[in-house]
Amino acid sequence: MYFRLAKRMLLETDKRLLWKLAWLAGYKGIRSIRRHRQRLKRGEFYPPFIYISITNGCNLRCQGCWVDVTAKQANIEADAMHRLIRQSQTMGNAFFGIVGGEPFMHPQLLDILAEHPDCYFQIFTNGHFITPEIARRMRQLGNISPLVSIEGNEIVSDERRGKEGVYSRTMQGLQHCLDAHLLTGVCTSLCQTNLDLLTETWVDRLIALGVFYTWFHIYRPVGAMSTPELCLTPQQQKQARRFVVEMRDKKPILLIDAYYDGDGYALCPAATGFTHHISPWGDIEPCPVIQIAKDSIYDERPLPEVFGQSAFLRDFRETAATYTRGCILLERPELLLELAARHGARDSTARQTVFEELKGMRARASQFNPGHEVPEKNWIYRLFKRTWFNDYGAYLDHFRREDWQDPRPQYEQCETSGSPDSAGT
């Protein structure tokens, strides 16, 4: 598997892009995590990886989308983006996630990223605005990896994304990226209607297309069309985790996840301090789906001070890590209401209905399933996670004890849709 993956990297992409990935996202990314660990030991804080929703504009209307895509389009302007990136660089950051809305609807997106050749950017996109010219521009810049969202086969994808023809346009944008020999990924938000996509045939198809990595997210029922019936059961989440672990050990493609350490214990990147999120209005949120905020990138103070001195963000991390190793939004939404009340935090959306949405949410299972951990089988992934991607000591030891009593409420269960062995595409 290692030889086949290395062969793909060497033969199927531009060597210049591979070098930039290794240097900017690899070496400098790991260095930023090392500095993060050192800051934590000193009682200081700045996340080594930041998600930036550069716009709320989008051409789709997806189920479970937390973004106010129907509101007037708001963009983070170039000056604010440059300040955010450059001040993050002073803290050692070099790798940023660009999300939306649809990032390519921001009129200055690539011009902004072109100003930062010493950083690496992963763009989460539906692919609809990636023309051959845009793909060639990204290849010219060399420091961008497009991560194209595919939510299932044509029928499921169009239903999930709220329009007809979505799947075909997404596949067209993906192909433009691959034709330009970009280091391209595919991401999927796993839910009831697309869980059957998790087959070896699907992974083989991605490899045949030339995709270098894939990322499976767990669906979270948020936003104006939350559609909670799409949530996965604990058994289905374990199925998804086991699939990822198995494929990592046999397929020449990188499979990314952000919810488990090398021993298979669940974690939340926001609770561990690995990442926080910037909204299109500049609000600093715990993560993209938790849309309450007290702080802003437009604060006159330097951003390291804003992050480091935020009592709200610190309380969020401590609260989330105290009650669960999973997703506090899914498991304990009432704690987020209490957190907002303690700090006078605001609803950071345009729709201004987040507090009502949290009040109406029912407890559901997240990635934390005590006693059913699935450790990494691939020793490289296991070593990498143990060294660079873990809980950074955020969680209490009682989560790992066999005598730990689970205090969480009984979760709302979802009906299983389809067979785990049936093909999704």
Image (cartoon, rainbow, N blue to C red):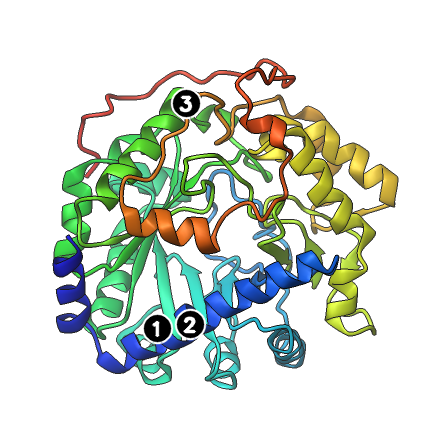
Front residue of this view, candidates 121 and 404: 404
Q: CA distance from mark 2 to mark 1?
A: 6 Å
Residue at 33% across / 85% down in the picture? 140
- In the image, what residue type sits under mark 1? Ala
Classify mark 2: helix, strand or loop. Answer: helix
Do the residues under discs 2 and 1 have CB atoms within 8 angstroms?
yes
Left of 249 or right of it: where is 72? right
Labels 1 & 3 near each other (Cβ < 8 A): no
Q: Residues within 10 Å of mark 3 (few under 14, many from 20)?
A: few
Residue topped by disc 3: 372
Indicate which disc residue 27 carries: 2
**Mark 1 crowd level (few <14, some 14–19, many ≥20, 10 Å Cα):** few
Whether residue 302 is situated above or below residue 278 in the rendered picture: below
Residue at 38 percent across and 56 percent down: it is 126
- C-alpha distance separating marks 1 and 3: 34 Å
Lower sequence index among marks 1 and 3: 1
The location of residue 381, given as percent across then percent down, is 33, 50
From the viewer's perspective, tell me whether residue 21 is left or right of residue 117: left
Alpha-carbon span between mark 2 and mark 3: 33 Å
**Residue 234, horizontal then vertical, whole percent:** 43, 22
Q: Nearer the viewer, residue 421 or 126?
A: 421
